[in-house]
Image (tube, grey):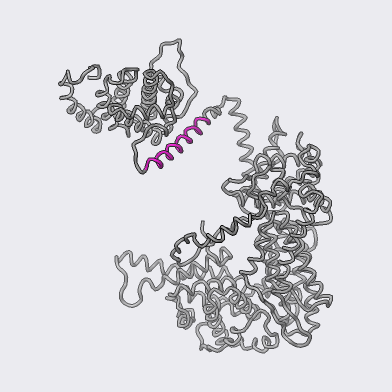
Amino acid sequence: MWDVNDLSACPVYTERWLYISNLSKCAFEDGVIERQDFLNELCDIFSDYFVRRVKNEEKLPQLRIYLLFLTQFLRHINNNLILARRLAHMIAMKLRLYKMEYDEQNNTVTKGPEAFTVLTQCSALRPIIHVLTAVLQNIVIDAPAAVIWNKFKVSTTDKLPFILSQLCGSPLDLLPCAIHELPLPSGKESERFVELLKLRTAEIVRRSQAVQDKWSFNQKEQFAFAKLVNGCLDVIGILDSTDVLEPNILPAVTTRIFNFRSENWAEEVLIRIKLMLHWAVTSEREGSHRAIIVTKVIYQQVLNQQSYMFGPFHMQDIILNYFYTEAPTYGSKYYHQEFASLVTLFIELSRFKLFVHDCFVKELIKSGELDYQRPVMEKFKCESKPPDPITSLISAQFEDLTPEEPPKPTGLISYKQEEKDEHVYLNDSMSMNDRILIQMPLRQTEEHRSEANQRALVLYGMDDARENHKAEMKKIAKEVCKIWQKKIYVQFLEGNEAPSWKQSINSQKIVEILARFRSQTYYDQMMICGWCAESFSDMIRDFILGHSLQMPTSEGLDVICGMFESAQYIYGIFELCEAVTPLLPCAEKIIRSLAADVIPGSMSGQLGYVFVAYICRHWHYFLHSDLAPTITNQLYELIERMIRAHEYPMTSWGRTIAAFVYHAKSQLKKSQLSDIKLHGARDDFRHVFNHGSSSYNGGSRYNALFFKDVFEKKLRFFSYHEYKKRLPSFGQLYNRYSFVINSFIAAKNFMRDHDRLSDLATFCGHISAQIPALADEWVAAIKALCCTSVSQHTGYGELLEHIDVNDCSTHYPIATFVMLLAGKYAFSVPRLIAELLNNAFPVIMKREQSSFVSGRYNVIGRSEYDCEPGVCLTLLILAQLSCATDEPFHR
């Protein structure tokens, strides 16, 4: 049939073809014939009868019949890479022959797409070319491995089977054009299909290049490559598995990483150090402590060998080599997150003098890359200049004409959005040397004054640009300092009067003020942080020296510590704590001398509490810093009188600080990270962790007015006189019962007013610190809210009459209030979690199981869904306790 030139002259073939084709298809599907042999024969027919240069009109009917029959088995051909490769090779060859035939007929050489565009205008060739193209594109999409390039060739001297040549190289190399440029039928999805082909082609090219790059090594290369991989795995495994709180862990890690034998020790140690640096930066690991761990390990090895040289490489050159080759680059997936980690690492490397900024700049000047006469920032002036006023005016006029995006439906919760990195010049295209000069911070100390001046000269030159920039940064710092100087502060008065808490700014306005700070470079942010920290400390000193009766509050300190975090200068928080904490006992003496009607320790307690909160966020970093023992002793001195003096009031702030000091002292001793004596005996902390009797007292009569008037006031600085007068009333069980219920009602009414919730939790924490039995009441009340079916047994069934747990709007204030209470040590968090897990979840799980077994829900009495709000509240409470935030996050 395939040999006949004219099918119309042999009608017997056309009459029998339908029967033969159906019989073959059925036999193939039923397994009557050997499938691989059958498909190989089909490919042989294509090769023997159609892949040769023929006239356009020759055997076109047979080719059409063959292609229609072949396409029925395409799915099976794609499952065999050899068959798919053969077929792709022959189709590419056939298309190539068509193009060559066209060029010969027209005595010209045309581009592939142009030739096929003309050929498809022929009604006889159009369906054939479209089918051939479709089959080849199907192979590329469904079996890309069949067209990947290989380096094999067939010898021309030996007479070998033709099939071998079809398996060499890549079938796509035979095409006269790219596969996505072959003709496609018109349609709406053609563009999307072309994009898919381009993606597949890029994958094929990448995999072909991997073959070209000789992934198949010889024996010697395999051994060297295996040693390299094993070395990398060794370093990563050591760093990942290390418990950084074990005693003398860093010298042990140093020994494990650097004590190895190798013929190429210098090259391998270079790889190991760069891998350590990358471990501290990559987004695939977490923790700010990575920077100080890696830095101290490398520094320990420098001390061990008494040299900064690792073979022929100096440590600074290794760091710069990492910056040039492995550091995060703009456009990578986690660029901003990894660059922030890189800044933290750079600060630690500079602090241990493993990287010397002065030497770096001098080398650049020596090489001619830097010149005082050609400041670096001149290259970026055009990019940072203000917009054209005419353009801005036109944009403003047409801004209202821009259609607004339709509002999206609001869900039960709104996910926390990832903060956008706004550091200027961070996304600009520049060399790594420029990026280091512009972004990387220098500590604002006398030791680095000359380096800071040198940096300013090479960046801004010797004209007014340098001073103008510094003045602009000081202007930003001045605006930030107004937050605690004029907007939020405590005004003390002489005489037996309560201090007044002044607040003339809200959180949104603070965010707006800090917006300019967040848009600066990391270096400029550190410089601004230094000025702001100095302003905060000076304000406390002025109060101590009697120059002022104003004291900054925890809000101002929270702003500064947040600024240090934004600048990635975590060590700066510890330095600020070391500088401010010794001033706080002196400030308390001044407050006592003024006979201020305020709970003793309130002022120093809330400031120390902020430091503790930020230090706990960077716990491992803090413990391995050289300031940890000193700060722990300073914080102990801050709360020593509170935990040791008889009948001295214990505040929630002081109780939390005391718990932190206890754990920090224990861990520093256990890890052998302190070289000084740590203050405080174990018995000093015996009252800090007193959380009641661990037994519920049951229900009592409820007084709806108990402390209701107090909860309506501002609670930040409560009158000490009234506090002492009301405190004895908590000796009565029904008053503790009423206090807890009224506290939750007040929290519910505050809704999403975080400031009121925080002050309420702080005040309740003060009371709980004085009345340990309240811990039982808090746990019982939370359990009643989360598990309504057992609320009567906890004695707090009456609480559900005032708080509707079915109303999801109450979940946020209650869960946030519980989280804030936990942060003030009002109750034992492990005990609360155990109670919730042992009581709330088993009830709902049993109900779901019984409903599943019965196949229906109980319609008599309590509905099966009555327990669901309690479980939702339980989950929200557990999430907030675990994540230490009131905002849900989305990953």
Horizontal relation, residue 679 to residue 707: left or right:
right
Q: Residue at x 56, y 29 (%)?
A: 213
Residue 857 located left or right of residue 527: left
Residue 437 counted in the magenta span: no
Res. 683 visible in picture: no
List x then y, in percent, for residue 787. 45, 73
Task: Tell me: residue 173, above or below residue 571.
Answer: above
Q: Quadrant of residue 114?
A: top left
Residues 118 and 754: in front is 118
Choose top left, top right, bottom left or bottom right for residue 750.
Answer: bottom right
From the viewer's perspective, is residue 411 above or below residue 205?
Answer: below
Place residue 7 in its image quadrant: top left
- The majority secondary structure of the magenta stretch comes to helix
- Asked whether 205 falls inside the magenta stretch, the response is yes
| Up-down relation of residue 566 to residue 161 (above or below) | below
Residue 311, horizontal then vertical, whole percent: 76, 34
Q: Quadrant of the N terminus?
A: top left
Measured as percent of width and height from the top left, residue 60 is found at: 27, 23
> Does any portion of residue 547 appear in the rendered image?
yes
Residue 473 appears at what percent x and percent y? 74, 59
Above or below: residue 46 compared with residue 630: above
| Left or right: 811 in relation to 692 | left
| Residue at 76% over, 34% down | 312
Q: Which residues are magenta?
A: 189-209
Q: Which residue is pictured at 78% across the width and 74% down the height?
A: 585
